[in-house]
Image: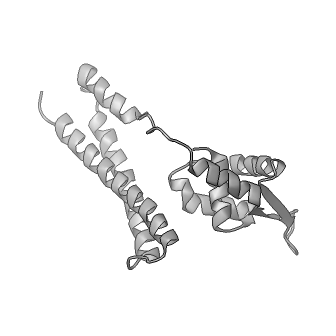
Amino acid sequence: MSLPHALLTSLAERPGSGSELANRFDRSIGYFWQATHQQIYRELARLEAAGWVEAAPVEGARGGKRRFCILAPGRAELQRWIGEHQDPPAIRDELMVRLRAEAVVGPTGLAEELEAVAARHRDKLAAYLAIEARHYPSAPAAREQRLQHLVLKAGIEFERQRIALCEEAVAILQTPL
């Protein structure tokens, strides 16, 4: 996946200014695809140059604020990208390598770090569960909402899996040699 497709997705959901997109990105797609606000603004300029999005000045706004919306060629690109064949992504997980290294050179005190990692995953899980409670108090009926909820549920399960992994690893690391 690329940042252009993440931004096209966000604009297909709802047009907005660069700052609105950056803020929405932080609260939704940003949980699954990281980008700085600077990267977002730079990519919006590229999308506009490609003719995939259009920006119009926001009346009454200061500083040249512009509102972006997706154009037909941008929707076509998004549809093309959705239909692409995709191999499963390669796993690149530093934690897994650190656990393997701990196995051969430990003990190193990794258990304390894993407890902190688990705490961060618990925080993110709590945030996801709060989003779910706020936006999906009952099973959504509309296809769009069901798909958005599915993505959120994948994030919830990922956080639960990481917490369980950290907890099991800490239990193993705290076992006397």
Please indicate, yes or no, whether residue 126 appears anywhere in the rendered image.
Answer: yes
Q: Residue at x 30, y 31 (%)?
A: 99
Could you say which quadrant of the image residue 53 lies in?
A: bottom right
Q: Residue at x 39, y 79 (%)?
A: 137
Picture colour scheme? one colour
Could you say which quadrant of the image residue 30 lies in?
A: bottom right
Query: Where 6 falls versus 16 (above or below)?
Result: above
Q: How many marks?
A: 0
Could you say which quadrant of the image residue 165 lies in?
A: top left
Please indicate, yes or no, whether residue 37 appears anywhere in the rendered image.
Answer: no
Residue 132: give x, y in percent of width and height.
42, 70
- The quarter in which the C terminus is drawn is top left
Drawn side of residue 26 relative to residue 133, left or right: right
Drawn side of residue 174 relative to residue 31, left or right: left
Q: Residue at x 38, y 79 (%)?
A: 138
Q: Nearer the viewer, residue 52 or 84?
A: 84
Query: Where 168 falls versus 48 (above or below)?
Result: above
In this view, the residue farthest toward the left is 176
Residue 128: give x, y in percent of width and height.
42, 63
- The quarter in which the N terminus is drawn is top right
Residue 114: give x, y in percent of width and height.
31, 41
In this view, the residue farthest toward the top is 105
Q: Nearer the viewer, residue 7 or 130?
A: 7
Drawn side of residue 90 relative to residue 18, left or right: left
Query: Where 140 falls versus 125 (above or below)?
Result: below
Residue 103: give x, y in percent of width and height.
24, 25
